[in-house]
Image: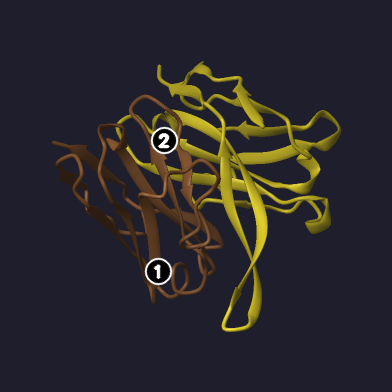
Amino acid sequence: QSVLTQPPSASGTPGQRVTISCSGGSSNIGTNTVSWHQQLPGAAPKLLIYNNNQRPSGVPARFSASKSGTSASLAISGLQSEDEADYYCAAWDDSLIAYVFGTGTKVTVL
Amino acid sequence: VQLLESGGGLVQPGGSLRLSCAASGFTFSDHYMNWVRQAPGRGLEWVGRSRDRVSSFTTSYAASVTGRFTISRDDSQTSLYLQMNSLNTEDTAVYYCVRESKDYGTSSGYRYSYYYMDVWGKGTTVTVSS
């Protein structure tokens, strides 16, 4: 059972901006940093964002993220066909003493 | 940097299985290591974590596997293990080995440390079925 809530789906046409929300609580997002992971079809997940808004080397600048209170969001600007994937937020939960993942959002490029 | 899982397969309910994760390309002993699983058509679920020597190799587990799964590591072999006992059909999933890294940030002049999962293996499939 996921503790972090995401919309099940999001979509846009090429070039559009898409945002994905991640809602948590005081013991996870409210206290700890958030990471985002991208899972392309048939592949293992890959780190996309860490420390709320930092991009690892090699991740395109069209991916950005932010955190406010107990929620976080991921934005994809200039949507491209290769961005079609599942996206998961994640954070450590101090109450559960466990990592928690979001429910996942499937992004479709129309 | 590479993580390579092995040991998956078909096992009957109530059975046991041991997964391995061979790490290369980084200083294994400096990192916490995790297992994350994904049931068919489902989202990601954290299974557990092994901290490093500095943290006395302590482990944490998800409630769903506590008492049945055990994580261990061998830093001399740069390997992580997951011993799974009393398996049931709900344990059917792809199991990923995931590295965790530590870094520092600043906020309002305050320096803080944080951890994040940054490298994923390709996964190994475990199927529990009679």
Q: Chain of mark 1?
A: A
Q: In the rendered structure, which amino acid carries the disc numbered 2? A: Gln
Q: Are both tags, 1 and 2, on one chain? A: no
Q: Quadrant of residue A79?
A: top left
* Residue at the outermost right position: B76
Q: How many residues crowd mark 1 within 10 Å: few (<14), some (14–19), many (20+)?
A: some
Q: Which residue is mark 1?
A: A67
In the displayed structure, does residue B86 sit left or right of residue A4? right
Is residue B73 toward the left or the right of residue B90 in the image? right
B75 vs A27: above or below: above
The three-letter amino acid code for the residue at tag 1 is: Lys
Q: Residue at x 77, y 50 (%)?
A: B52
Residue at x 40% of width, y 69% of height: A67
Q: Secondary structure at mark 2?
A: strand
Disc 2: CA contacts within 10 A as few (<14), some (14-19) or many (>=20): many
| Quadrant holding the C terminus of chain B | top left
Residue matched to label 2: B38
The percent position of residue B18, horizontal first and vertical second, equals: 64, 26
Q: Residue A65, image x and y in percent?
A: 39, 60
> Tag 1's secondary structure?
strand
Place of residue A35 in the rendered image (x, y in percent of width and height, measured from the top left): 47, 55
Does residue B103 lie above or below B9 as drawn?
Answer: below
Q: Colour of chain A?
A: brown
Q: Residue at x 54, y 68 (%)?
A: A94
- Nearer the observer: mark 1 or 2; the answer is 1
